[in-house]
Image (tube, rainbow, N blue to C red):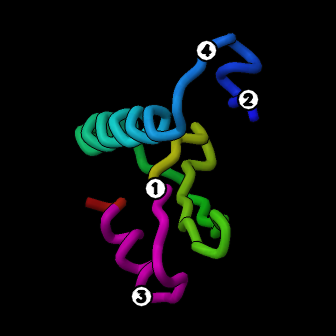
Amino acid sequence: MKSVLDLLLGIQRSTGYISQKAQQIGAAALEYSQNLCLPISVLAEADEIFQGQQPCLTLVDGRSFLVLSLSAQDHRDKTTWGCILLDVQS
């Protein structure tokens, strides 16, 4: 079975290689985003999306569409949401 990279770009890479690169890019994005400071207040819009059966709690600024938080969680209860909201505030 051909991968999307092979079909679109003619590049053949193993699933392990793609997974490793995705993890590296994710770590770099996390480091970058943790250093961002928003100069204005945000209009946070919250939603739950799912990857398979696992909830991914999502916060987006309604004005700029900046993703404030997108994180896979074990639970989607009020305590988990509250912790995410507190993390975004700091």
Q: Which residue is mark 1?
A: 69
Residue 30 is drawn in which quadrant? top left
Task: Specify the segment rendered in magenta.
Answer: 70-87
Please report the residue visible at 65 percent of the width from the left and 75 percent of the height from the top.
53
31 and 87: which is toward the camera: 31
Q: Whole-Å distance between the Cαs marked 2 and 1?
A: 33 Å
Q: Residue furthest top?
A: 10
Q: Which residue is mark 4?
A: 11
Q: Whole-Å distance between the Cαs marked 3 and 4?
A: 44 Å
- Circle nearer the N terminus (1, 3): 1
Q: Whole-Å distance between the Cαs marked 4 and 2?
A: 10 Å
Q: Which residue is mark 2?
A: 2
- Circle nearer the N terminus (4, 2): 2
Q: Which label belongs to residue 79?
A: 3
Please report the residue visible at 61 percent of the width from the left and 60 percent of the height from the top.
45
Residue 5 is drawn in which quadrant? top right
Left or right, 86 with respect to 65, comes to left
